[in-house]
Image: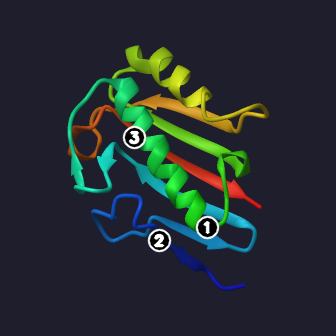
């Protein structure tokens, strides 16, 4: 098997030496997303709900470039700057799934890239 690099111009470009996603066999590993606007490539600090919506939109664009959708996600990792945002992030996150939620962990971290409030990475499978 050979790995395939996935890229979407509808999601932010990588801000370091990594790919938006890597597909290997039937698995697709998406790098962590913060709330960067793909049209401006800028992060603008916002509340947790707004950041989560932008992140999920970015994830959707990368999934689409890989020929996948939210229903293909099997595992999610959520990193929060403040665990007090947990309920807000949960509410937005849940709206992207009809049922059969992915496995997930949510952890509080001391700092995220660009001082973002939220970062989310996912693993999807076909």
Residue drawn at the location 61% of the way across and 67% of the way down = 66
Tag of residue 7: 2
User: Label 3, on which residue?
Assistant: 54
> Horizontal and vertical percent for residue 16?
29, 66
Res 44 visible? yes
Tag of residue 123: none
Q: Earlier in the sequence, mark 3 or mark 2?
A: 2
The Cα–Cα distance between marks 3 and 1, rounded to whole angstroms, is 19 Å
Q: Is residue 80 above or below residue 85?
A: below
> Horizontal and vertical percent for residue 110?
29, 32
Disc 3 + disc 2, Cβ < 8 Å: no
Q: Earlier in the sequence, mark 2 or mark 1?
A: 2
The Cα–Cα distance between marks 3 and 2, rounded to whole angstroms, is 17 Å
Residue 49 figure quarter:
top left
- In this picture, residue 16 sits left or right of residue 74: left
The Cα–Cα distance between marks 2 and 1, rounded to whole angstroms, is 8 Å
Disc 3 + disc 1, Cβ < 8 Å: no
Tag of residue 66: 1
| Element carrying mark 3 | helix
> Horizontal and vertical percent for residue 15?
27, 62
Residue drawn at the location 58% of the way across and 58% of the way down = 63
- In this picture, residue 10 sits left or right of residue 72: left
Crowdedness near tag 2: few (<14), some (14–19) or many (≥20) residues, C-alpha within 10 Å:
many
């Amino acid at each position: 098997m050979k790995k395939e690099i996935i890229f979407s111009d509808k999601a932010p470009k990588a801000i370091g030496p990594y790919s938006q996603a890597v597909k290997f066999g039937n698995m697709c590993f998406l790098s962590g997303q913060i709330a960067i606007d793909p049209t401006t490539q800028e992060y603008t600090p916002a509340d947790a709900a707004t950041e989560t919506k932008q992140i999920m939109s970015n994830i959707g664009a990368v999934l689409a470039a890989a020929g996948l959708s939210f229903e293909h996600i099997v595992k999610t990792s959520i990193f929060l700057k403040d665990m007090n945002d947990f309920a807000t992030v949960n509410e937005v996150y849940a709206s992207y799934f009809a049922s059969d939620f992915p496995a997930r962990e949510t952890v509080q971290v001391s700092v995220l890239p660009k001082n973002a409030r939220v970062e989310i990475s996912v693993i999807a499978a076909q």
